[in-house]
Amino acid sequence: MYGSETWRLTENNKRRVEATEMDALGRSFRISRKERIRNVIIRQQMGLEEPIIKETEQNRLTWYGHVQRMAEGRLPQIPKIPKIALKWIPKQKRTGGSPKKNWMEGIRKAMNEGNLYEGQWEYRKQWSLGVGQRRTTF
């Protein structure tokens, strides 16, 4: 999905994306919600193994690795912006309650789930294996 690399996926957003995906799959397969067919069965009939959220998480990790491998002066006129933008945290205080998760926390969680560690993005093959883009070992 275009631009999904920069999304901050909350649980609410994940539910909405999954609902939209299942609505589109059901419509393309001409299945009505009134038929009450489970999402797993619709996915099997369409030949899909994983939800689109997994692809979104892969895209985020791929883009994160790409930005981390970038040379400092690569972007014209504004060097160091990508890495500064990844580490940016707003300065104003939040209201009461638990703080909202930022994009970087989502990346750290996905890295933990994929057994990836800081600095591993330098080794492209290992990174793409951990992200899940490649299906074979090297």
Image: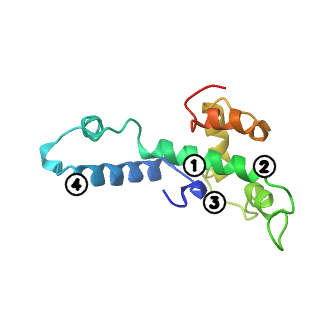
The mark nearer the N terminus, 3 or 2, is 2
Name the residue at 24% across, 53% down.
28
Left or right of 23? Residue 30 is left
Residue 78 to residue 82: above or below: below
Residue 14 in percent (x, y) is at: 45, 48
Q: Nearer the viewer, residue 41 or 69?
A: 69
Q: Mark 2 vs mark 4: give the one in front.
A: 2
Name the residue at 52% across, 48% down.
56
Q: Which residue is mark 3?
A: 95
- Element type where label 2 sits in the image: helix
Work out which residue is located at the far bottom of the displayed protein and give it. Answer: 77
Separation of residues labelled 1 and 4 (CA atoms):
26 Å
- Determine contact: label 2, label 4, CB under 8 Å: no
| Three-letter residue code for mark 2 | Arg
- Element type where label 4 sits in the image: helix
Residue 25 to residue 134: above or below: below
| Three-letter residue code for mark 1 | Asn
Residue 17 in percent (x, y) is at: 41, 52
Q: Which residue is mark 1?
A: 59
Separation of residues labelled 3 and 2 (CA atoms):
36 Å
Q: Is residue 102 visible?
A: no
The mark nearer the N terminus, 1 or 4, is 4
Separation of residues labelled 2 and 4 (CA atoms):
41 Å
The mark nearer the N terminus, 2 or 1, is 1
- Determine contact: label 3, label 1, CB under 8 Å: no
Q: Which residue is mark 2?
A: 69
The mark nearer the N terminus, 2 or 4, is 4
Q: Residues within 10 Å of mark 3 (few under 14, many from 20)?
A: few
